[in-house]
Amino acid sequence: MFIGEYKHTIDPKGRVAVPNKFRGKLSEGVVVTRGLDNCLFLYSKAEWEKIAKKLSNLPISQKDARAFARLMLAGAMDLEIDKQGRVNLPKYLREYASLPGKAIIAGLYNRLEIWNPSVWKEYKTGTEKESGEIAEKLGELGI
């Protein structure tokens, strides 16, 4: 389970350290892809297999299903964690998430999200202001 919020630096080569407490769970490698809200999603290979299977089963006859599968699958990159615990984020993914020399890595149970710090702050502030309304809507779903 991935939880918490961590500040990290992205070096000039595009490498960012994975929080130390998660490295053991990701030792087999990771898959990083375009996420929602202009962040990146980072999955363990085992978790990615589950996600990719669901995406591949979406109906290709539906435009939104095709678009979402393309966003997630075509944007994905299979990466290894180096001896220093870093992943080398491809340039196209760094550009998608507008990642400067810093990043916020947020744990969200089955994935990590990699955010531009200013975008994360804005997103988090907005979500915190709307937390009551969000909770009410989720209550309707049984959460």
Image: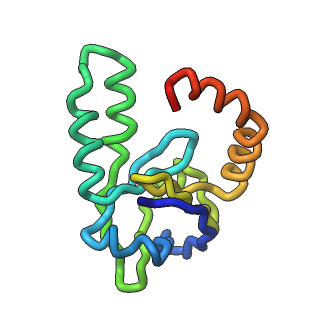
Quadrant in which residue 9 is drawn: bottom right
If the image is split into quadrants, where does the N terminus sit?
A: bottom left
Q: Is residue 100 above or below residue 142?
A: below
- From what the image shows, is residue 76 above or below residue 101? above
Position of 20 compared to 72: left or right?
Answer: right
Q: How many marks?
A: 0
Which corner quadrant of the image does residue 128 belong to? top right
Q: In terms of depth relative to the viewer, which is nearer, 114 or 92?
A: 114
Residue at 31% over, 15% down: 62
Residue beneath the point at 63% across and 67% down: 102
Image: 76 above or below 62: below
Front-most of residues 127 and 94: 127
Residue at horizontal 61 percent and vertical 24 percent from the top: 137
- Residue 8 in picture, x, y percent from top left: 59, 71
At x 29% / y 73%, what residue is drawn?
27
Q: Is residue 132 left or right of residue 102?
A: right
Where residue 73 sits in the image (x, y, percent)? Answer: 31, 41
Q: Residue furthest bottom?
A: 83
- Rendered position, 102 above or below 45: below
- Image coordinates of residue 38 in percent, x first then y, are 56, 44
> In the shown orientation, is residue 104 left or right of residue 13?
right
* Residue 89 percent across, percent down from the top left: 44, 63
Q: Nearer the viewer, residue 35 or 109?
A: 109
Coloration of the structure image: rainbow
